[in-house]
Amino acid sequence: MDIRFILCAIFIAFSTFSYGQSLETKQIEKIQEFGIDYQSNMQADPNFNTEFQNILELDQNRKKNKTWGIVLSGLGLLTTAYGTTAFTGEQANPYSTIAGGALIAIGLAEMGVSIPLFKSSKKRKRERDKIIEKYNPNWTVEQ
């Protein structure tokens, strides 16, 4: 046989396995935490896996953005507080006031960067909840 034919057949065989649409057990459990019955929706809707994977991806991105927003806002608060103490300290000299001013600016910038992360997290949650409500009409935002 021709080597190209064998390589092509192997490539096709492996590519069909890599594009499977089934969800893992952890993903199914996460979907069920949202009050969605996975088994009944699997049979009712042909696009169920795409929608469910979209829910999981939006939820993961939401958590990631919220975590980074919290980290950056906390770090910005600490940096600003330290910069303020250095800027207005009793032993203030020209170098400490410059360093304090720089730390204040850096802290405010960190807190400023956290704002879009929080907004993005909230947007992803609304998008996720809209898809969840399609499969679970009793879903509320408070859950």
Image (cartoon, rainbow, N blue to C red):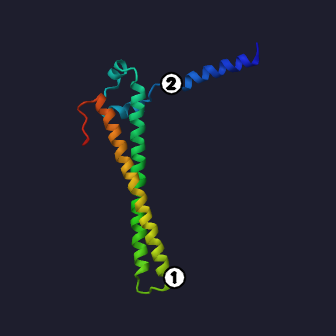
Foreground residue, 43 or 47? 47
Q: What residue type is labelled 1?
A: Tyr
Quadrant location, the C terminus:
top left
Q: Is residue 114 left or right of residue 7?
A: left
Calculate the distance from the C-alpha at mark 1 to the C-alpha at mark 2.
Answer: 61 Å
Q: Residue at x 66, y 17 (%)?
A: 9
Residue 119 percent location from the top left of the image: 36, 50
On the image, the x and y values in percent for residue 78 come to 40, 67
Q: Residue 10: where, in percent of width, then height?
A: 66, 20
Q: Which residue is drawn at 34% across and 42% down?
A: 125
- Give neighbour class at mark 2: few <14, some 14-19, many 20+ (Cα, 10 Å): few
Label 2 SS: loop
Q: Label 2 amino acid?
A: Gly
| Mark 1: secondary structure | helix
Q: Quadrant of residue 12?
A: top right
Lower sequence index among marks 1 and 2: 2
Residue that appears at 48% across and 81% down: 96
Residue 95 badge: 1
- The residue that disc 2 covers is 20
Left or right: residue 62 versus residue 98 is left
Q: Vertical placement of 133 versus 59: above or below?
A: above
